[in-house]
Image (spheres, rainbow, N blue to C red):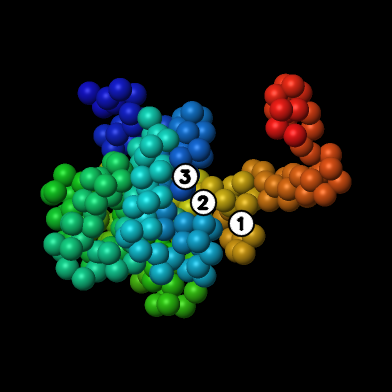
Amino acid sequence: MTVSNGKVTTVKLKEMKKKGEKITILTCYDYSTAKMLDEVGIEVLLVGDSLGMVMLGYDSTIPVTMDEMIIYTRAVSRGTKKALVIGDMPFMSYHVSVSESVRNAGRFLQEAGANAVKLEGGREIACTVKAINDAGIPVMGHLGLTPQSVNKLGGYRIQGTDEDAARIILNNALALQDAGAFAIVLECIPAPLAKMLTEKIDIPTIGIGAGIGCDGQVLVLHDVLGLYSDLSPKFVKRYASLRLKIIEAVSQYKLEVKSGLFPGAEHSFEMDEKTLGKLC
Ligand code: KIV
């Protein structure tokens, strides 16, 4: 059995890879949005630590804490019936010791209702991935441009362009697969490398700036909807310009309040004149 109560499972994602059925993933950070994405049938909602930038206004994902991730993940879980919910482990929550990493990963399931966690890194975190997976917590890997390492990488730039760097990414993918990861995000690497890697490993690859050859795609929802304007990576496709729509709507609200047009009679509650008269 691969799907229970219509809920997407990690087993179902592996089956989708086998069948060549593309996997859709979007980031999600709140209850109301989770309900919409779930209704559409997006298979995986990723509560990415990108929320630090698009929701909390940090200039990177590094300041994001476990407690912040738990609050947002809990909200998404409440709004989700079918999609697999993945909590993104924030910077320093899986670097100090294996036991602390397992405990933090467990919080996503126990306190926040997530179904899996995501960690950035390759061979160097393979032991941690194995320990978390052994504790019954499915793990998604993340290779290529790993934003928590932005200081080491020297900026948000394409990875794996020369032979050595590409080989490291390939070896890291194999290490994550061996450690029990159920899928791997490939961020900002050349499309031919992602395609080759996707054909070499058995678990699904999820691309973001990694071309068409991956088993699935993920994007930050705020980029897709045109809600976040601080950064605009080449790999983003904007499907709506909601920022403009919101500015338009809020400007109209302001205008109507200032001019006395809102609230109208249809938005107000009446009271019997006699009752009112008794008060005067
Ligand atoms: O934090 C995030 O949103 C992510 C995705 C971009 C993969 O890690």
| Label 1–label 2 contact, CB within 8 A | yes
Which residue is pictured at 21% across the width and 71% down the height?
96
Is residue 57 visible in the rendered image? The answer is yes
Disc 1 residue type (three-letter): Tyr
Which residue is pictured at 64% across the width and 43% down the height?
239
Question: What quarter of the picture does the N terminus occupy?
Answer: top left
Q: Could you say which disc has been placed on residue 228 in the image?
A: 1
Ligand 1 positioned in quadrant: bottom left
Give above or below for 221 relative to 269.
Answer: below
Identify the secondary structure beneath mark 3: loop
Disc 2 residue type (three-letter): Val
Where is residue 98 drawn, in percent x and y? 16, 64
Quadrant housing residue 164:
bottom left
Identify the secondary structure beneath mark 1: loop
Which residue is pictured at 37% across the width and 55% down the height?
69
Disc with the residue nearer the chain's start (1 vs 2): 2
The residue indicated by pointer 2 is 220
Where is residue 128 drawn, in percent x and y? 19, 60
Of residue 199 and residue 60, the one placed in the foreground of this image is 60
Q: Is residue 198 left or right of residue 238?
A: left
Distance CA(mark 1)–CA(mark 2)? 10 Å
Is residue 188 visible in the rendered image? The answer is no
